[in-house]
Image (spheres, rainbow, N blue to C red):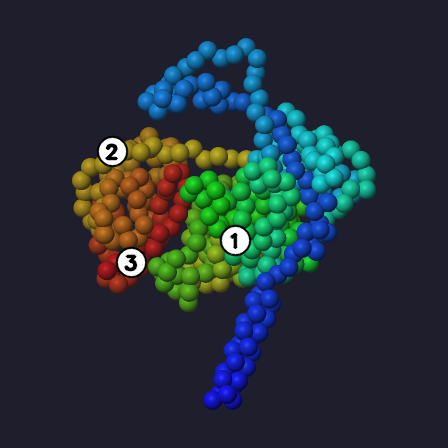
Amino acid sequence: MKNHDLKKGLYAAVFTMAAAQSQAASAVDFSNLVEQVSPAVVSVNVVKKMTQEELIQQQVPEILRRFFGNQVVIPQPQEPQEKTGYGSAFFISKDGYLLTNHHVVENASKVTIMLNDRRELDATVVGSDERTDVALLKVKGSNFPELRTGNVDRLRVGEPVLAIGSPFGFDYSASAGIVSAKMRNMMGETSVPFIQTDVALNPGNSGGPLFNQNGEVVGVNSRIFSGTGGYMGLSFSIPIDVAMDVADQLKKNGKVTRSYLGVMLQDIDRNLAESYKLDKPEGSLVTQVAPNSPAAKAGFKSGDVILKYNGSAISRTSDLLNYLNRTSPNQMIQLQVLRDDKIRNISATLTVAPDDTPAKTEQIQPQKGPVIGVSIRNLTLEEQAQLGVKGGILIQDVKRGGVAAQSRMMAGDVITQINDKTILNSNDFIKSVSELKKGSVARVSIIRQNQRAILGMRIE
């Protein structure tokens, strides 16, 4: 009995020791790292002029705003008012250059930084890029502590990372977590392949560094995904290679120049993969080619599927966009393209990207119509001219649960082609759909909010 108890106690001790060792192995001690890198991290304080809308919001009592919104107008004061903000930044050179976020210093009339030894210095905004949310600051002086940058390509999902910043103004707060994902493109944004982590970021962390275990900066903390305004486990950082490229351009030219191919792109889903006879959803689908663009001059066509970029496989559109964003203008690129069930190799020379913002199309009232669960009508000549198309039909209503709804068609979409057949009017549409066989997947070319896309429509 005593031997049994002894063995039982021994097993329990061994199990407890193993569990403790496992926990110790899984926990990362960042204390030495924090002590080492903190001197290169600073708090950023900004003074900004208040916008007209902010002035109104500040002066209108809450009870009036609740019932009347911003329609209540109160005479404005003669003197312009200002507000303060805060964030974080870090030194990337010994001569006083720092990285932070564009949104931290946007419209700032004064920027100051505070070092961890409590010194305060005035900072100049060298340049700022809204699309990547990166800004470059400069302070006078020399021999500042400079942080080392890491290789983002070697960063692995699940790897421990550390953030240092000033959440809610609490200076030099450290928070740790792991890399949750890489190459995230958020809400239609294509300029930044964000690093997603579960590191606790809050207002004030913006612009601060994200470190790997070696004390190297791998990202610039930029934003969170939240339904409450506070941290909810989804934080996003700008890869340091993207931020440093922007900083170099701002330092040399005062602005950022991007490469331009001239195509609209979308991901390949299951239906489109089957339609294009692909083994799995992969590649990036060209939905529109801009006139006189590098893509047009290279011979690209709507419906092409880009499978490789300079020999690197394209799994989804974000991969291609990230390669393009990393390539300088005036460089020639090689693209492998699937067209008419054949693989082609196309060369294109990138140019400088224009700053275009497409106009939004007009929403039109529905009327009844037949076929695959949609209500349709012909486009007017004026609408065709606005969209730059000949013919086309407008989807005015989509039946819930129908073939069109399952294919992600929406009211307001304009259908221009089905399986490469041009749709001039509703008769063409009805005829083309009636020719589709049950179980087949058709390619439907649409225009949605002035942007072209191709949907896979499965006929059940």
Label 3 Cα neighbours within 10 Å, binned few <14 / some 14-19 / many ≥20: many
Tell me the kind of residue under disc 3.
Arg
Give the alpha-carbon distance from disc 3 to disc 2, as whole Å: 27 Å
**Left or right: residue 234 compared with residue 205:** left
Residue lying furthest front in this view? 2
Q: Position of residue 295 (x, y in %)?
A: 53, 47
Pointer 3 with pointer 2, Cβ within 8 A: no
Can you tell which of label 1 and label 2 is closer to the viewer?
1
Give the alpha-carbon distance from disc 1 to disc 2, as whole Å: 45 Å
Residue 444 in sight from this viewpoint: yes
Q: Which residue is mark 1?
A: 198
Tell me the kind of residue under disc 1.
Asp
Query: Circle 1 — which element?
Result: loop
Q: Quadrant of residue 274?
A: bottom left
Front position in the image: 28 or 93: 28
- Please tell me which residue is depicted at 25% across the width and 58% down the height of the picture: 459
**Left or right: residue 436 compared with residue 236:** left
Give the alpha-carbon distance from disc 3 to disc 1, as whole Å: 38 Å
Q: Which mark is residue 458?
A: 3
Q: Quadrant of residue 360?
A: top left
Label 2 Cα neighbours within 10 Å, binned few <14 / some 14-19 / many ≥20: few
Tell me the kind of residue under disc 2.
Gln
- Please tell me which residue is depicted at 45% across the width and 58% down the height of the picture: 339
Pointer 3 with pointer 1, Cβ within 8 A: no
Query: Circle 2 — which element?
Result: loop
Label 1 Cα neighbours within 10 Å, binned few <14 / some 14-19 / many ≥20: many
Q: Which residue is mark 2?
A: 365
In the picture, which quadrant includes the C terminus? bottom left
